[in-house]
Image (cartoon, rainbow, N blue to C red):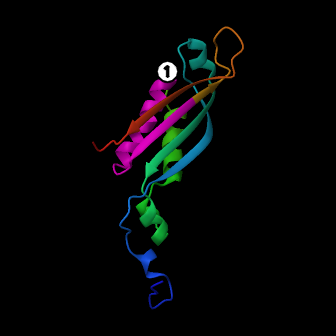
């Protein structure tokens, strides 16, 4: 293996000639919000769970241990927290859409984003573990 002066494999220090991809995820971020079709849901509120999956080539970030070359999941968490707790939407579909659009607007180089919003124990007239909506954007730059 070729070594640099520092003794590190020099192939890891330059961009690769192959295509790479990665995924950065937030899984089950939980917030209290006021969303739903029924007025009672807006008044009382409830628990909302959110997953965000971002497709991004983070090879350069990994090679250089550099946050500026990937997405900042702490910032994504803050987008989600703000959208869930500071808005009142009728549909969890709108909430998923707005989260995905915010990620794409902030990180235009991502290869895709998928957002799932879950509402545990939704008011559907009977037992139901959760309602969920998933919104996916593939290849946002095309």
> Residue 71, how many percent across, how many down?
45, 54
Q: In this view, does 118 lie to the left or right of 86?
A: right
Q: Which of 10 and 136 is in front in this view?
A: 10
Q: What stretch is highlighted in magenta?
A: 91-117
Q: Which of 53 and 40 is in front in this view?
A: 53
> Does the magenta segment cover residue 19?
no
Q: Nearer the viewer, residue 37 or 3?
A: 3
**In the displayed structure, would residue 130 be above or below residue 86?**
above
> Residue 14, how many percent across, how many down?
38, 74
Quadrant of res 27 = top right
> Residue 35, how many percent across, how many down?
54, 23
Residue furthest bottom as drawn: 5
Please name the residue shown 46% across and 87% down the image: 3
Q: Is mark 1 on a helix, strand or loop?
A: loop
In the picture of the structure, the residue carrying the numbered disc 1 is 91
> Does the magenta segment cover residue 116?
yes
Please name the residue shown 48% across and 29% down the image: 95
């Amino acid at each position: 293996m070729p070594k640099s002066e520092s003794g590190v494999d020099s192939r890891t220090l330059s961009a690769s000639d192959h295509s790479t991809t990665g995924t950065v995820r937030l899984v089950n971020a939980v917030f209290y919000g006021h969303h739903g079709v029924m007025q009672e849901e807006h008044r009382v509120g409830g628990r909302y769970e959110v997953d965000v999956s971002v497709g991004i080539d983070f090879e350069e970030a990994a090679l250089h241990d550099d946050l500026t070359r990937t997405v900042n999941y702490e910032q994504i968490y803050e987008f989600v927290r703000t959208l869930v707790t500071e808005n009142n939407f009728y549909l969890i579909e709108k909430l998923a859409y707005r989260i995905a659009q915010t990620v794409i607007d902030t990180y235009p180089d991502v290869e895709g984003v998928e957002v799932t919003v879950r509402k545990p124990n939704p008011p559907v007239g009977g037992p139901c573990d959760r309602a969920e909506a998933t919104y996916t954007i593939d290849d946002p730059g095309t």
